[in-house]
Image (cartoon, rainbow, N blue to C red):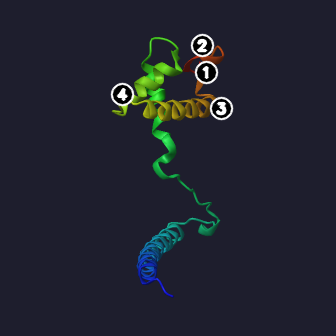
Amino acid sequence: MTDTHLISGLVTKRAELGGEIAKLRRQLQALLNDLDAIDRVLLMVGYDKSPNAIKPIERRPGGHRDPFTHVLIDLLREADGPMSSSALVQLVMRAENQDEGDHGAYLNANNDVRIALRRLRSKGIVERLGDGLECTWRLAQQ
């Protein structure tokens, strides 16, 4: 006993996936062509190493809040003194036109700001003053 409705749906889904694969193959070929053109120009202008030795950079979709780091640096630069994490979260949300009353958006922004602050701290760009919930942040003293 065959289920024609199920078969029809699977055939449609397979056709859609095949179309996506064909599109991705075209995109891949275009990227390979661009890479090849860049390699040729590098060699023409005197690059003396193998272009294949250049390590690829994989960027995360959305840049994973890298713009947050710039916003945070600007906020701390303009601040009169050290700022709490919660104050930074609120200012970042305003800067990105996010609804501060949206609890889910606040939690996401809070997580992103904390990650960005840790990253900036590990690079020596910002300093944490104090511990726990009472800590504040400022630009590192140069």
What residue is at 45 percent from the left and 11 percent from the top?
80
Question: Which residue occupies the extreme left position in the image?
Answer: 97
Circle 1 residue: 127
Label 4 Cα crowd, 10 Å radius (few <14 / some 14-19 / many 20+):
few
Instruction: Give residue 48's position: percent from left, percent from top.
Output: 61, 66
Q: CA distance from mark 1 to mark 4?
A: 23 Å
Above or below, 54 against 110 in this view is below
Residue 6 found in image quarter: bottom left
Q: What percent of the width, then of the height, locates residue 82? A: 52, 14
Q: Which mark is residue 48?
A: none
Separation of residues labelled 3 and 4 (CA atoms): 26 Å
78 sits to left or right of 134:
left
Q: Quarter holding the C terminus? A: top right
- Looking at the rendered structure, the kind of residue marked 1 is Glu
Amino acid type, residue under disc 4 in the picture: Arg
Please tell me whether mark 1 sits on a helix, a strand or a loop.
Answer: strand
Which residue appears at 36% of the width and 30% of the height? 95
CA–CA distance between discs 3 and 1?
A: 9 Å
In front of the other: label 3 or label 4?
Answer: 4
For label 3, the residue is 122
**Disc 3 residue type?**
Ser
| Residue holding disc 4 | 94
Badge nearest the viewer, 1 or 4: 4
- The local crowd at label 3, few if under 14, some if 14 to 19, many if 20 or more residues have their Cα within 10 Å, is few
